[in-house]
Amino acid sequence: MSALVNFSINVAKLPKEKFVQGKNGNVYYNFTVSLNDETNQWGQNASAWDSQTKEERDAKKNRDFIGNGKVVWTDGNCVTAERVEKEDTAAPQPKQDEVEDLPF
């Protein structure tokens, strides 16, 4: 392990249409985390935003920030995770009534 990060996520900013139903029946939300070398005025050096598609990134669409945090421990090494290719990478979309039943 190379880092531990504590986050506060504003769940009200999570668009319900982006929740995905996993094969195991759990509901997931994909977001992107950035760890920065510098700390802001609130002592935070990590941020999270709604994951974007390649098309959204290419179109330079503004990111929807959903939370901030800070690294609370590190061994000084952060490495890139190796991608494991799967045959079926498409996640099924949740039904609207399943998303509305979420506890938040």
Image (cartoon, grey):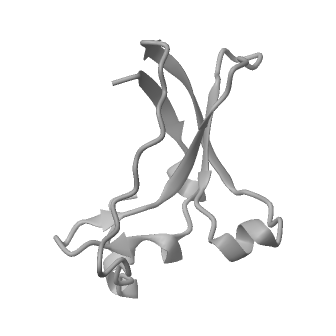
Q: Quadrant of the N terminus?
A: top left
Where residue 98 appears, as percent x and y from the top left, is 31, 79
Is residue 90 positioned above or below 24 on the image?
below
Residue closer to the observer: 104 or 61: 61
Q: Which residue lies furthest to the right in this view?
A: 60
Instruction: Report the residue at 62% width, 71% height from top.
Output: 53
Instruction: Report the residue at 56% width, 50% height from top.
Output: 32
Q: Report how many numbered discs are placed on residues in the image.
A: 0
Residue closer to the observer: 48 or 1: 1
Instruction: Report the residue at 52% width, 20% height from top.
Output: 71
Left or right of 83, for residue 60: right
Is residue 37 positioned above or below 12 on the image?
above
Where residue 19 appears, as percent x and y from the top left, is 43, 70
The part of the image, by quadrant, that contains residue 81 is top left
Is residue 39 positioned above or below 9 on the image?
above
The part of the image, by quadrant, that contains residue 14 is bottom right
Residue closer to the observer: 87 or 100: 87
Where residue 49 appears, as percent x and y from the top left, is 62, 51
Where residue 43 appears, as percent x and y from the top left, is 66, 15
Left or right of 46, for residue 4: left
